[in-house]
Amino acid sequence: EELATRAGDASTEAVVEPREAEEIAAQLPLDASAADAPVFDEACRVVDARQHAVLRPRDLIVEVAGRRIGPLESVATALAEAAKGVGGAGAAVQGRLAVLVRRPPIVAPLVPVPAPPGTLGAPPPPPSPLGAAGRSLRLLCLTWNMHGKEPPAAVPELFSRRAGAAFDLVVVASQEAERSIEKSLLLPSKRRWEATLQTTLGGGFVLVASHTLAAIHVAVFAAEALAPIVSGVRSASVATGLGNTLGNKGAVGVALNVGRTSFAFLSCHLTAHQHAVLARNADARRIEEALDLWPAQQSGREAGGGATPRDMEAGARGAPGAASPGEMGPGGARAARACISDRFDRVFWLGDFNYRIRGNRDIVESLLAPVAEERATRDGFPSTADAEADNLRILLRNDQLRLQMAAGAVFRGCVEGDVRFRPTYKFDSKQRQAYDLSQKRRIPAWTDRVLHADRPGLVRLHFYGSIPELTTSDHKPVLADYTVEYEAVRVDGSAGQASGWADSSGAPTCGAAAAAASAGTPAADGPPQIVRTYTRSRGGKVLNDPPRQLAGGGGGGATTGMCAVQ
C-alpha cells in the first residue's frame, strides 16, 4: 500500500519487453531518489505474481531510465547506480521502473571434451575467466541408489563409460549403500563400500573425505597429483526424515578447497512417493539452509588488498554478492550467504531426489516403448531413434523436478545436463532390465540426478548419462563428467625463490623446486615427505591439511606444502 501511494498507479502497460528467461514481475512509475529505495527492497520480496517462491535480490533485474542493472545485491544499489547515470550521485530518478525476474535456463548444454594438450590439430585452450591464476580440473560425479545390496570387491562398470579420461576428482554419492535403510540406522558404516571404490579406482587416487548418515553416503577421491593442493576439507550431514531427526532421508556433504576455489559436494535422498512433491521441495530447502558446511578461510591473498582472480571472477559474471576488493574478507563474498548453493564457488548436487514423472503407468510406458519404423516415418521422423528421443522429451516436460526448477521452487540457481537416457527407476526385482512388474507397477522416473550451481564458463559439462549394464539394484547409476575452473594458490617469492602459481600438474610450478624439476634434477631440498592423516567425527572422515612447511634442507629452501609436489 505504501508503495502504491508513493509510486502511483502501477497498472500501466509494459514499456520494457522481457528478454529470454525473464518475465516482468512489476512495473511502476518512479519519482524517487536513491534515499527512497528501501521501499522498493520490501516490494521486491513479494512482486512475484506467480507465487512460486520468495524472491531473492539475485533473481531481479531493474530497468530504469533506459538502463538495466542486475543481478542485484539490493534495489537500493540499483537506484543509486541509475541516479549516477542520469544526473550524478544523489540525483532524482524520474521515469518508469521495471522489476524483472530472472528465470535462467535449467538445462546445461553438453560441450565437447577438450582435446589433451599437445594433440595434433587441437585448438588452443580458451583463456581462463580467472586470468593468470586460472587452472582446470576434470571431475566425475556419480550417484547410485544401491537398494541395500552388498557391494562387490570392485565395480569397473561404474567408470567404464568414461574410460580413458584422466579425472582429477571423483565424487561418488550412494543411497541405501551396503545394507537397507532400516539396518543402516543401527549400523551405518560404509567401509566395505569405500574399499570397493578405492579398489576400482586404483592406487592413483587418495580418499579425501567420506561421510555417512544412515544409508546415505558420499566419498570424494582426488588424484595423487591434485591431493597436495586440496585443503580445508570438512563434512557434515542433515536429516530430513521423521521430525527432521531421523536419517532415513536427508543429505551428507563434503566441502573442500582446490587452490583458492571452494567446492561443495552433496549426496541427497529425498522423500519418496509420486505425490510428495512439496515434501521433496521442503527437504531440499532444509538441506540448503541447515547443512553446516562453510568455505574454509582462505590464506594467500596478496598484501594491500589488491583484486584477486576470485574478485575478478565474481565481477566478470555479475555474480550476486560480487564485492569490491576492500569489501572481500577471507573466503570471498560467498562465504556469508545462507544457502549452500550460494556459499561456495562450485556446488554439485547428487542423489536419489525421488522426483517422478507426472502421468500414469500406461502413458509413460507407451512413450518408453520402441517406436516402429513405419510409425516414425508416418510421424515425420527421419529415424526411429529420433522418434524415441522425442518421446523422452515429452516425458521430460512432465518431469516433476524440471517443473519445480522452472517454477523457481527448488534448486534455484542450479542447472542439469540434457537428459538423453531412459528413466533410472524402478526396475523389477527379477527382470532387471524391465520396469516394475509387481502389483504396484510403479511409474518409471528419473529419480537419480546430478545438478550443479550455474557458473557460466567455469563449469563445463561433457557427458551426462546412466549405466544400464549394472543390474544389482532397482536403480541405475547416473554420472556426469565436467571440466571445472579453479584458482591456483599464489606463492610469493622468498629467499631465492621466484613467485608463481601452485597447480595440479604433478610438478612444481614455482621457486627452486620448479627450476630443478624442469632441469630433470631433484630439488636441493630433496623430495617432499607427504604424510596423510585423517580426522574422524560424527559420521565423517576427512583428510587433514598438508603441513605448511615441508622438512628439508632448511632456511629459504623450504617451500609450502601447496607448491612442492613431485
Image: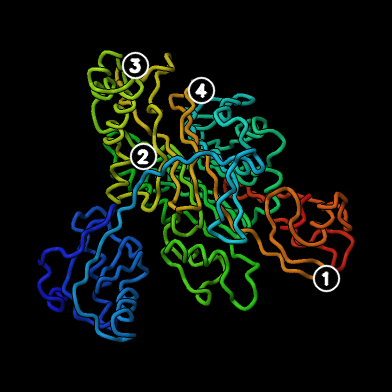
As drawn, the label of residue 271 is: 2
- Disc 1 marks a residue whose amino acid type is Ala
* Residue at which label 4 appears: 470
- Disc 3 marks a residue whose amino acid type is Leu
- Image coords of residue 346 (percent x, y): 51, 53
Q: Nearer the viewer, mark 2 or mark 3?
A: 3
On screen, 37 above or below 389? below
Task: Decide which of tag 2 and tag 1 comes sooner along the chain.
Answer: 2
- Image coords of residue 413 (percent x, y): 38, 53
* Residue at which label 3 appears: 437
Q: Nearer the viewer, mark 2 or mark 1?
A: 1
Q: Secondary structure at mark 2?
A: loop
As drawn, the label of residue 495 is: 1
Q: Nearer the viewer, residue 522 or 48?
A: 522
- Disc 4 marks a residue whose amino acid type is Leu
Asked whether disc 4 touches disc 1, contact meaning CB atoms under 8 Å apart, the reply is no
Question: Is residue 338 shown left or right of residue 74?
Answer: right
Q: Nearer the viewer, residue 17 or 542?
A: 17
Q: Nearer the viewer, mark 2 or mark 4?
A: 4
Q: Residue at x 81, y 59 (%)?
A: 550
